[in-house]
Structure formats: C-alpha cells, structure tokens
Image (cartoon, rainbow, N blue to C red):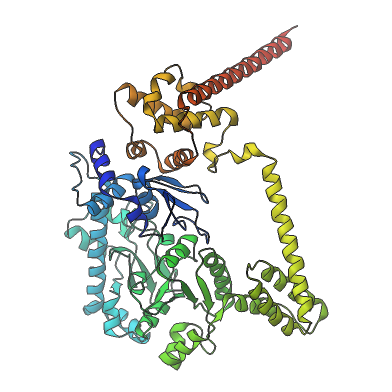
Amino acid sequence: MAIPEAFLEELNERVDLVDVASGYTTLQKKGNRYWGCCPFHSEKTPSFSITPEKQMYYCFGCHKGGHLINFVMEAEGVGFVDAVGILAQRAGMPMPEDNGNPSEAKKRERLLNLNKEAARYFHANLTGPQGQQGRDYFAQRGLSKRTVTNFGLGYSLPEWDGLIRAMTERGYTKLELLEAGLAVQSKKGGVYDRFRGRVMFPIIDLRGNVIGFGGRVLDDSTPKYLNSPDTVIYNKSKNLFALNLAKKSKAGYLILTEGYMDTIALHQGGFDCAVASLGTSLTENHARLLAKYTKEVVISYDGDQAGINAAQRAIGLLNKTGVNVRVLRATGAKDPDEYIKKYGHNAFQRLIDGAAGQIPYRIGQIQQKYDLTADDQKVQYLQEAADLLARLSSPVEREIYGAQAAEAAGIDKAAMLSEVERQRSRLGWQQKKQADRKALTPAAENQPTERQFRYRNVRSAMAEEGVVRLLLLEPQLFPQAEGLRQEEFSSQVLGKVFGILQSRWEEGKDTPIEVLGALLDNQEMSHIATIAQKPESLQNSEAALADYIRTIQTEHMKDGVADDSDLLAVSSRKRTEDAP
C-alpha cells in the first residue's frame, strides 16, 4: 500500500516520538536530547537517545536508529503500513484508502478477529456436550470454572477439520486459517486443523488481542504441548503468557514460571503476578519485556536439572536489563502448581519472601557441583565462585558473598577476597587488551555494525556519509553536488540514499526523514540514522561538501585504476599462456 507523503508528514507532526517511546522506556531530558535505556537491547546504562526536533532516535549501544515510524516497526515487530496504522490510530487520523488490495493493517485485523472467533469456538467446545474430556482434565488439575472462564480455556475436538468448517462458515478462508497458524497444509495439498483433541490455552497480548494458542494432549501422544507458529500477529519470543493480566498486579514483582499450568495455578492461588514464556526458553526480548513492567522478577522454575539450567540462563538475561532477580526453591513438590495444592497460598508466599537473591543462588549451584571435603574440588569451587564475584561491580557484594563462599569451604575470608581481586585484575587486563586492540584499528571503528553494510573503502565511505549527512541537513547544497554520480559511491546503501535524494531534488521535492523511511527497509534506515547522528559542522558546509566529493571521486578513480590494472594483468597472463 502506497501511503501519500502528505499523510506521513502530517502524522509526523501530530505524533511526538518522545511520547511514543516513553511507553517503552523511561526517558530523561539532558541538554537538547532525551535519554533512556534502549527498548531494543538489554542494558543498565542509558545509551538510547531521541532528538526531538528531528523526530529521530538512535542507540549508541546497539546502533539501531531511525524516525517515528521505524521506532514503532521495531518496537511492535510490524511492517511499515501496520506501524503507520498504529500511529494514525493514536493521532485520530483515518488511514488513506488503498483502492486496491487489502492493506497489511486490514489483513492483520482479519487474522486477529479470526483468532478471537477460534478462541470462542474452543471455549464453546469445552463447555458443550463434546467437551467432557477437557473439563475432566482441568478439574483434575484443580482449576475452578471461574479460572477456566477468566483465561478463556478451551478444547479442540478430535476431528481433522472441525475448526476449519466452523470458521469457513463464518466467512474466513482456508488461506487465512493457514496464515493464522490454525491450520496445516499436507504434502498432498489438503488442509487440516493444527489443534485436534487438545485442551487449549489462548495467548493474549497486552492489548487484549488473541494472537496465538497453546494446546496440550490428553493422552500420551506427542508432542505433549503444541504451540502456534510465528505469524504476522504472533511472535513467541516477544510475548509472555498472562502478562496482559499480571501487568495490573500490585505485588511489586513478577513471578516467572515454566508453563501455562503453573502460571494459571498461581493466579488461581492468589498470585496474580505470574507469567510464562511461550513454548521457548526465556529470550532477550522476554527479559526486556519483563523489565518494562517490573523492577523485580522471582524465578519459579521446576527443581530438576533442566529447570536449574533454565534459571541460570534467565538470570544472565535479566541481569542485563537491570531488574533485581530472586530464585524461589520449592522443596517437597516438583513445580509451583503442585506446591500450592499441597501446602497452600501462605506457604508459597513464605517461599517467595525467602527466595534467594541471584548471587547466593548461583554460588549455591556452583557449590553443589563439588565435594568440598576433597581439597582439589574445594580449590575448583573457590576459583569458580571467585570468577563470579569478580564480575560484581559492588565491593560490598563482593565482600559479603566472598565471606559466605569462604565459610562454606572452610577457608579464611581474606584469602577468598584476595582471590576475587586477582580475578578482577585478570578481567581488567583482558578488557584493556581488547580496548587497545580496537584503538590500533581505527578503520574498524568506522565500519557499520551490520555486516551487509561493511565498507570496502573506508576513506571513501566516510566522505560518502558526509555527503548524505549534509544533504539531509541542508538540501539547498544540492546544486554543488551536481557533478557527483551515484555509481561513484563505494557503499551501495549510501549510493542508494544519495540517488533517492538527488532524484527527488531534481523533481522539486524535499525528502523529510519520514518519507525517506518509507523508501528504505528498517536496517537501511537504522544505518542512515547512525550517520545522521554523527556531528557535522554547518559553518563551512559548502567547503566540507566539496572536500567530501573530491575524496569520493579520487577514491573512485583509484579503484578504477586498480580494476584496470587487474584486467591488464589478467590479459597479459592469458597471452602468455596462449603463446606457443
């Protein structure tokens, strides 16, 4: 769908990027910019910035950047048209008519409505005459009718096309069922229901939309759990089960569990702050999502080795977001669901209150790996614990936890702290070595982070960046760049942007950043945002532009001469080989 430039410009004027971004991260004004922790990668020190007058953002950590629409595309994981639709709704602006095929936004709306109808169908199955098996399962798991209703739980009939028939009767096509992940196409071309003979768990996003489903078998068949695939409306690594409910909790923390039933059981037991990842281990996106809604996460995973490993990984991801992490240890039950059934709400609350901080938990896990009655294993335990403690920035934490580790091993506290400091020195030396190596390769510092944009001629590319930057800032300089050609650029993406700016200038059109964003993909726009954020003095802009153009053309001629020399060498070699 082609969106009129005038519509994009008006949208950019009506919606403030700072207001939009404030819904994803906390921003503070410093000078002429707003700063906050990046919503696109995990960090503790703010490196995400917004320049309000340009309506542009840039992160100095992950190097993502762009304009208002790019931000929504990245934050919501949607395409350009959908992002414009979200912003238009915010601004109260009706989307322009397409006069052609349905837009991405309309397609998305159709799939969301289809999922809603499917959820109603599954719930009706559960409460109807054919749902006894599903009702028995939930009753055995101790779920009340109220809980079943609150979570919209359901049942998929053991039929090949029960859902397909029901949804096609309501006006949806088999193609839409496939696109929503509700149906599967066989190798022979037939289409059948993805979920059959399973209890169903609808997955609901923060806006209340049904975006996917999880289904559990009622017998010993496999897979035990089956989840919706990623679709245009569902991404399992960017959503958490029950976060739509838990975000309203007043508990002050979120409980992270391993699955749907643990989360539902906790909610029924009075813990309305429980969430779960969706058929996958915790990801960086999940960790950032949790950090948006809480300052503390209590991990409540199963006590088996798989649960311990998953908890260790989750701690590492959550640490990067700056949230406080505690780990709950439930003895006498395999999971939170079983524990609450056996011991009740108050007992589980005591477990939460006594949940260990992440450092004691991790040291405890290290300790369990070794026999501390054997000297050689005691040394290995202390060295591994010291490596963990050496990475802590707080000297108070290093001393307290170092003393605890020393006591567990039966050694002097001072010896343990000495080992921790030795490890800190080693880590500091490694970091300095890496920094020195970087400092010795300035050309590498100027290379884009995205591999597909790597510069083959850094000197020329730096000048090409300067040309693009100046022409974005001062389009009236274009007459001075008339002798510069797109094919003289060594960087394909910079040449592409120059070509866009040049052709639009020749047509008498300005190129505001939101219009440029419509002509580039997100990665290209992010790269241009990186360039636009670099300092550029406009005091002598004409002279600077002339210098940049001269460098580009000189480097282009050098490359041309090199190419000609290579061709001559090949030609000469060929003649020699062909000689009698």
Q: Residue at x 27, y 44 (%)?
A: 13
Q: Is residue 243 left or right of residue 13?
A: right
Q: Is residue 576 above or below residue 158?
A: above
Comparing 395 with 174, the one in front is 395
Identify the residue at the far top of this view. Answer: 580
Where's the N terminus, which quadrant? top left
Where's the C terminus, which quadrant? top right
Q: Is residue 269 left or right of residue 530?
A: left
Q: Is residue 142 left or right of residue 463?
A: left
Instruction: Measuring from the top left, give residue 510's x and y in whole percent.
Output: 31, 30
Residue 426: in sight, yes or no?
A: yes
Instruction: Measuring from the top left, give residue 174's x and y in whole percent.
Output: 26, 54
Q: How many marks?
A: 0
Q: Is residue 359 above or below residue 490?
A: below
Q: Residue at x 39, y 54 (%)?
A: 75
Q: Is residue 105 above or below residue 151?
A: above
Image quadrant assignment for residue 550: top right
Residue 185: in sight, yes or no?
A: no
Instruction: Measuring from the top left, give residue 438's x and y in whole percent.
Output: 67, 44
Q: Residue at x 46, y 91 (%)?
A: 347
Image quadrant assignment for residue 498: top left
Instruction: Measuring from the top left, give residue 56's x and y in whole percent.
Output: 39, 45
Comparing 31 with 179, the one in front is 31
Identify the residue at the far right of this view. Answer: 375
